[in-house]
Image (cartoon, helix red, strand yellow):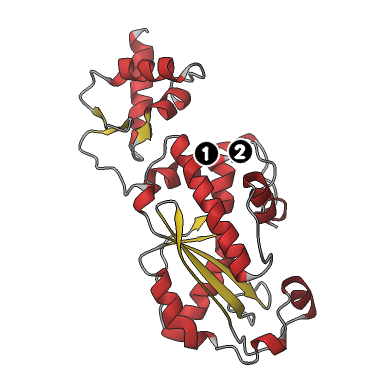
Amino acid sequence: MSGPTRRTLVQRVADRLADGPVHTLALAREILRLEGHPGAASSAVFALLGSDPRFVVDAGGRWSLRGRPPGEPLERVPFAVVDVETTGGRAGQGDRITEIAIVGVLGGAVVDEYSTLVNPGRSIPPMVRRITGIDGAMVATAPFFEHVAPDVASRLEGRVFVAHNAGFDLGFVRYELQLALGEADLGAPLCTVRLARGLLPRLRRRNLDALAQHYGIGNHARHRAHGDALATARILIRLLDEAARQGFHDLESLRKDLRRRTRRRSRRSPQRTLWEEES
């Protein structure tokens, strides 16, 4: 390998690791463009970086810049997978939550589940009733959101907020918590649509049904909060397994790499509409 070429590759590795640790095989694929036998590809990375004091590799094969601690391992990150049913699509503009479910995920397993109908304090439009099956009679005796807000907030606290098309669910939950409690510090969400877009680029559709079919996951109550939240949680677990196979073991490096992949792909080709990917 010539001097200038080696220096260029090493600098590209350093730039890549500035965002967090990366597995050996991922570096081989992304930086060295080696698609052959994993053992040979990994050996090339060690040959390139092994004697450079700026880089360090851990027992799991993840490289990082020396002195930069890795982020929290994915298996130790607690997730709250959320789904809401609502009277419409306008959080804070008249529409309210009619049902909410929260499924806790930790260490690759579902650890707790919560769901409740919610009285929205307004009528439910006919189209929404047809889709969800939730009508006025069902929510008439349900608690208002202000009554369940402390429980919802406690189940979200300290966990990464996850949803399929997360902006929608986050917008409604944040609005309702602010209205009920005066605050809603939910942190940065993780969207399973965007996870699938980054980790499964060859999959044409990333809506909930398509991902469930891809992974062979059932849904006992489609378009109801608990059914969709539980299906999303199981999809999240499979996506996190896929992230580990691709060399991502902490949330920080996964988030940053997904943003990079999304930017690179958007420059190459037009994005599909949200309806095509998420509906």
- Can residue 8 be spotted in the picture? no
Q: Give the residue at x 56% y 52%.
A: 235
Q: For the point 68% across and 67% down, which residue is it?
A: 223
Q: Position of residue 119 (x, y in %)?
A: 61, 87
Whole-percent x, y for residue 232 in the image: 57, 58
Determine which residue is flagged by label 1: 261
User: What is the x, y in percent for residue 173?
Assistant: 52, 73
Mark 1 belongs to which amino acid?
Answer: Arg
- The structure residue drawn at horizontal position 48% and vertical position 88%, both measured from the top left corner, is 147
Q: Are marks 2 and 1 in contact (CB under 8 Å)?
A: yes
Is 146 situated above or below 58? below
- In the rendered structure, the answer to whether residue 42 lies left or right of residue 134 reads left
Badge 2: few (under 14), some or many (20 or more) residues near its Cα, within 10 Å? Answer: some
Q: In the displayed image of the protein, which residue is found farthest to the bottom?
A: 141
**Along the viewing direction, whichever of 80 and 108 lies nearer the viewer:** 108
Q: Nearer the viewer, residue 237 or 22?
A: 237
Q: Which numbered circle lies on residue 276?
A: none
Sequence-wise first label, 2 or 1: 2
**Residue 97 at least partly seen:** yes
Viewport quadrant of the N terminus:
top left
Q: CA distance from mark 2 to mark 1?
A: 10 Å
Residue occupied by mark 2: 201
State whether residue 136 is above or below residue 42. below
Q: Nearer the viewer, mark 2 or mark 1?
A: 2
